[in-house]
Amino acid sequence: MADRGHFNSRLGFILAAAGSAIGLGNIWKFPFEVGNGGGAAFVIMYLLFCFILCFPVMVAEIAIGRKTQRNPVGAFKALGFKNWAIIGYLGVLAGVVILSFYNVVAGWAFGYFLEMLSSNFGIGAQFSDFIKDVTKIGLYSICFMIATAFIVSNGVAGGIERAAKILMPTLLVLILALLLYALTLPNAIEGVKFYLIPDFSKITGNVVYSALGQAFFSLSLGMGALITYGSYVERNQNIVGSGAMITLADVGIAFLAGFMMFPFVFSQGLEPNGGAGLIFVTLPGVFESLGGTIGTVVGSVFFLLLSFAALTSTVSLLEVPTSFAVDEFGTERKKTVWVVALVVFLVGIPSMLSNGSVEWLSSFVTLPGHDSAISFMDLMEDLASDTFLPIGGFLISVFAAYVWRTENLNEELAASDASIKDSFLLKYINFALRFICPAILGVIALVTVLDRFFGVSLIG
Ligand code: TRP
């Protein structure tokens, strides 16, 4: 096989994988899911899911990728378990679906960057008209898909590593600064309370379900994105440690983004359960309150960095179907990238139209346990992130622990340094993959499948 390329350094891999993880999921999706899920109780469930369930699955994915040096479909075949390649096929499908709507939201973020440049702070109040403007959004998301395809066609391990090294710390600093500012605002304390003091009566089946989906989505887990990234990692890297750092970085940014948002939401007298528009409605007012030029600068830098964060994520999403096609069908990489990007863009069109511009797409279906209809885009989000990803995670944990087997997994995890075998983290990973992940994810997957596909409603 041709040289697949490698990340240039350990830091390079961590940055690229963290770049894949940190994106709209942290800054756009996490706050509104917290808002819809009733606040602190959702935050706690999310944190528990990330550390207890997702971290072990992440390490397993990276190990499978590095061991086999293949895409998510090829990886299972290379280990000699053809039937398990179903995980990879599901992953490729989930990748296409997620990228199709993700790219639309990335277009919103990019559009907001332009609006902030021209100091249009009123855009927050016009959010629902903004996302209806199909010509504009279409243009922004085409640009976004082109940028993504351009990066992927030049290989993951190049420019992305370098850009991430500068941009992600800057994003972190900006979030911290906004967080401190938020805390000075009137009524901010109500937001802090909402975010940090749990009301466990708010936890319903649907809240558990979306906290779990959010954990997987935010860590880019359950569809083989990290199998693919792991396939570019060299054997002298400690992937247990890298996995821990990626998890911490991603969860840290999500936590801070939420911490920043709710004081803003409450100080403006807005409702926390504003849904997908939450940051887009709230933040322009915040930037306006900073006054003239400062507001324009901070606002445009914020949405520019958000667009970059989204770009390092869309890159990983496009990489999965691309590396699948290149490895499995031997197609030429550059051409494949553009064809896949075009297909994904087309798949995303109904999502783009489902935010108010086309009526039937905008209230497309009513899911069990909900009282109002959701849009086509929300359905894609629900199916791909909250349904496919946890099912993928369940299958990966069962595969790693019982099919590929713990000894082989550990062999790969300790390839850089035999002493890793005695570490507490590895012991925990083994235990979790054997018992905790299959049990919890299995139950949730079963309930979800019954609920979503057979209408047997156990969650409410
Ligand atoms: N994790 C990214 C975010 O939070 C989105 C993402 C990128 C993703 N690659 C993925 C989600 C793979 C699931 C699977 O914005």
Image (cartoon, rainbow, N blue to C red):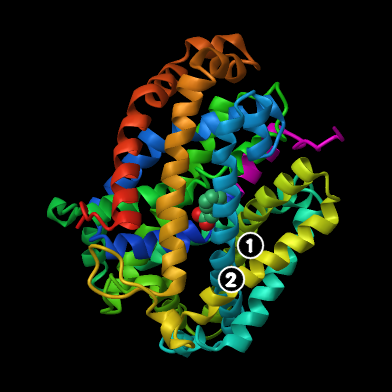
- Is residue 4 in the magenta section? yes
Residue at the spot of label 2: 348
Q: Which mark is residue 233?
A: none
Quadrant housing the C terminus: bottom left
Quarter containing the N terminus: top right
Marks 1, 2: nearer the viewer: 2
* Mark closest to the chain's N terminus, 1 or 2: 1
Task: State the image coordinates of residue 257 (x, y, percent, origin top left).
Answer: 42, 59
**Residue drawn at x 62%, y 37% as measured from the top left:** 227
Dot 2: element: helix
Label 2 residue near ligand 1, CB within 8 Å: no
Vertical position of residue 416 compared to residue 99: above or below: above
Alpha carbon separation for disc pair 1 and 2 = 20 Å
Residue 2 higher or lower than 239, as above or below: below
Residue type, mark 1 in image: Phe
Residue 149 x, y percent position in the rendering: 75, 61
Tell me where residue 169 appears, x and y as whole percent.
Answer: 59, 52
Q: Position of residue 126 (x, y in %)?
A: 44, 89
Give the residues drawn in magenta, as a range.
1-19
The residue lying furthest to the left in this view is 201
Residues packed near mark 2 inside 10 Å, few (<14), some (14 to 19) or many (20 plus): many
Q: What element carries label 1?
A: helix
